[in-house]
Image: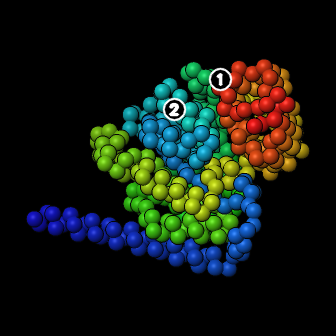
Amino acid sequence: MNGRFINIIKFLKKRYYQLRYWSNLYRNMVKQLDNQDNYNDKNIKLIPFIDKPGIAFSFDDSYRVNDWYMYGKDMFGFYDIKVTFNINGVHPLEGNREHNQKEIDQLLELQASGHEIAHHGYKHQRATDYSAKYGYDKWIEDEIETLFNWIEKQSHSITKEKFKKPVSFAFPHFKHNRHIINKIIPKYFKIARGHLSNDNLTDFNHVGFTPSICLDSYYSCNLYYLKKIMRMTKKTGKNLILTCHSILPEDLSAALGKGEKAMKWGTWRVSPKIIQTIIDEARKHDLEFYTTSEIAGIATFIDPNFEICVREKISNPSDKWVKISELLKIKELNLSNKDISNLDGLEYFLNLERINLSNNNISDLRLLKNLPKLIYINIENNPIESERVNVNHKGMIT
């Protein structure tokens, strides 16, 4: 009985401190935002990637990829609830082995569903500690450049698709300083995600450090206050980044394996039920779902041939990154005979009216459904697997 009483006290204390944490978090955000301009006219038509506020889920630690794939892939759907998966190159609970082919395939299949694969440091070293011990250049060499090189070498075992080059970075353990940020942005990344800062929200086309709110382990997730924060996000016209780790049902205890470290790291988890509640609440308030790179205003492409064609249409083809704002200006695309097999990135052409896709290797046309102004397409001579988009004899979508 005494032991049970002690456990109840510990539980109540934990709940109390979590409630206090979230209530203080919310009040501080309100104070920060009191003097800022808000969207008050509900009739304003907001445009995705430009001024329509949204949510960005950001999942850390790719040794959790099996959880992401098993419980997240179907829930997030195909270019529906787009999220960012921040990856390392090794599995720290299994002797720091590099990711095996099964894990690489799972990550690439998540990318093929519209999700961002972002950079989280090769061995997940704390940037501040590692650079203090070995120097900033050594940290960049070991953690940043080594993972870039590893990513570039990988491909899917069947489709042969490769990883996109990461645009965003997530600080391991949220540890950073101003000098580290200046070292990696804009040379390596457009945006770097950490934890709480200022109003905890992010404007579009952001460059540099961006905050997030963590939902698991000792931070936990208080849905009452999180829903209030989401309503605040809608009102301000900004974006909210939510950091998570594993996706695991609440009743699943042994998640990451045996041992003290596995048990401790296993507390960094959020349930599919909580994620679905957040998704439902976001849809209720007409919030968009973005990746971190999309909040930074950057478009990415799986197919390098498609990207080459796109760069020919923008003002500066040699820019390090392709800006979404430039793609929104394009109304016609002629992609005929370009050896294109994947249309990832087409979702950013929201004002596209006409497109010629003839004589390519495209088998999936589902992204065409996401283009509201498209009235004409030519899809002749493509190995289309199924008629997911119906086109009449005039090339009109029906």
Using the rendered view, name the quadrant where residue 313 is placed: top right
Q: Residue at x 81, y 35 (%)?
A: 396
Q: Is residue 86 left or right of residue 15?
A: right
Q: Residue at x 52, y 77 (%)?
A: 27
Residue 334 picture location, percent across and down: 87, 32
Instruction: Check the image and name the residue furthest to the right.
Output: 315
Image quadrant for the C terminus? top right
Between 142 and 19, which is closer to the camera in this rendering? 19
Residue 175 picture location, percent across and down: 53, 56
Q: Secondary structure at mark 2?
A: helix
Residue 274 picture location, percent across and down: 44, 55
The CA distance from mark 1 to mark 2 is 22 Å
Using the rendered view, name the quadrant where residue 40 is placed: bottom right
Q: Residue at x 64, y 79 (%)?
A: 34
Between 62 and 121, which is closer to the camera in this rendering? 62
Label 1 belongs to which residue? 385
Whether residue 146 can be seen here: no
Q: Are marks 1 and 2 in contact (CB under 8 Å)?
A: no
Q: Residue at x 44, y 37 (%)?
A: 70
Label 2 belongs to which residue? 106
Mark 1 burial class by Cα count in 10 Å: few <14, some 14-19, many 20+? few
Residue 246 picture location, percent across and down: 43, 46
Residue type at mark 1?
Answer: Glu
